[in-house]
Image: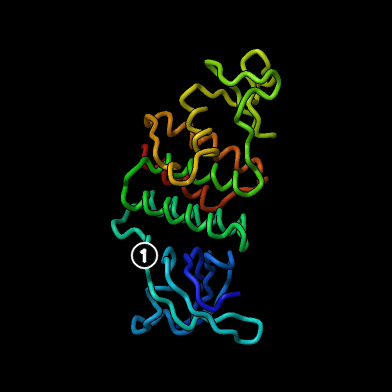
Amino acid sequence: MKTVTDGLVIKEMSIGEADKLITILTKDDGIVKAYASGVKSIKSKRSVGTTLLSYSNFSFSKSGKNLRVSEATPIKNFFSTDNDIETFAISQYFCELCAVFEPHEETAPEFLRLILNSLYFLKEKKKSPLMIKAITELRIAAKSGYCPNLVACEECGAFEDEIMFFNCENGAIQCKNCNKSEKNVPLNKTLLKAMRHIVYSPFERLYSFSVPDEAAKELSKITERYITYQTDRSFKTLDFLHTVYLESET
């Protein structure tokens, strides 16, 4: 692996009083783990660059079979400093998604670019948090071998209907006439257009659309249902996020 690379800290674990084991999504090598000695001390020059949600330039050294952080120069820190628990919860969820899908060298730059942009939009509050969540979930799925087929009805080839139906099991859509399952999720034109944009648009245009707040909530539920079904697992950070949103709405 490269000894110098840019990366985002997606997980940290304390070791003793002064050290940490950090998990980093790197541009060149995907997910790597490295020991960071003495970084829990406020006097450490590597302290800021090795904290959760810090995007930094890292230098590594080899110690036996283990990597150690020699230098960590912060580029951008995405940790929320305004006590915004919702933003932090979604940010942690994005980190868990990266850890679950474990991008390797060939996909790491795309993953890193996606997560960094989503974290930026979250922190700057430039879009609905649930919209950013939906974009990130569906785009990660599409880039990880779980790309849905949203081009047309899988049965008759119809491109669009007033209501299309999304099958979370095989990622296909069906028109009203072809849909035979009550489990399929209804998609109005707004939701279908948004999902198509997320999956098929070039990255430069990925975030260049908007939907009403209610549509963003529904879209978030659909993309979440799809990614949890396809991975056949639960996400601890997602459970926490549900608690946060439940509390914020009461």
Q: Nearer the viewer, residue 87 or 111?
A: 111
Colour setup of the view: rainbow
Q: Quadrant of the N terminus?
A: bottom right
For this orientation, the residue located farthest to the bottom is 63
For mark 1, does the 10 Å Cα neighbourhood hold few (<14), some (14 to 19), or many (20 or more) residues? some
Q: Position of residue 151 (x, y in %)?
A: 60, 29
Q: Residue furthest left?
A: 82
Who's the residue at 56% across and 60% down the image?
108
Is any atom of residue 83 visible in this view?
yes
What's the residue type where badge 1 is placed? Lys
Query: Does residue 17 appear in this view?
Result: no
Task: Kindly state the secondary structure of the residue where label 1 is placed.
Answer: strand
- Give left or right: position of 128 versus 190: left
Q: How many marks?
A: 1
Give above or below for 53 relative to 121: below
Q: What is the x, y in percent for residue 161? A: 55, 16
Towards the viewer: 131 or 84? 131
Return the x and y of residue 130 as percentages of the image width and height.
Answer: 42, 40
- Which corner quadrant holds the C terminus? top left
Above or below residue 231? Residue 9 is below
Residue beneath disc 1 = 76
> What residue appears at the point 54 percent right and 24 percent down from the top-left corner?
187
Residue reaching furthest to the top: 177
Q: Within the image, what quadrant is residue 99 found in? A: bottom right
Q: Nearer the viewer, residue 202 or 247?
A: 202
Residue under the point 36% across and 64% down: 77
Q: Is residue 115 above or below residue 199?
A: below
Would you identify the image quadrant in which residue 173 lies?
top right
- Looking at the image, is 226 positioned above or below residue 136? above
Q: Residue at x 50, y 39 (%)?
A: 201
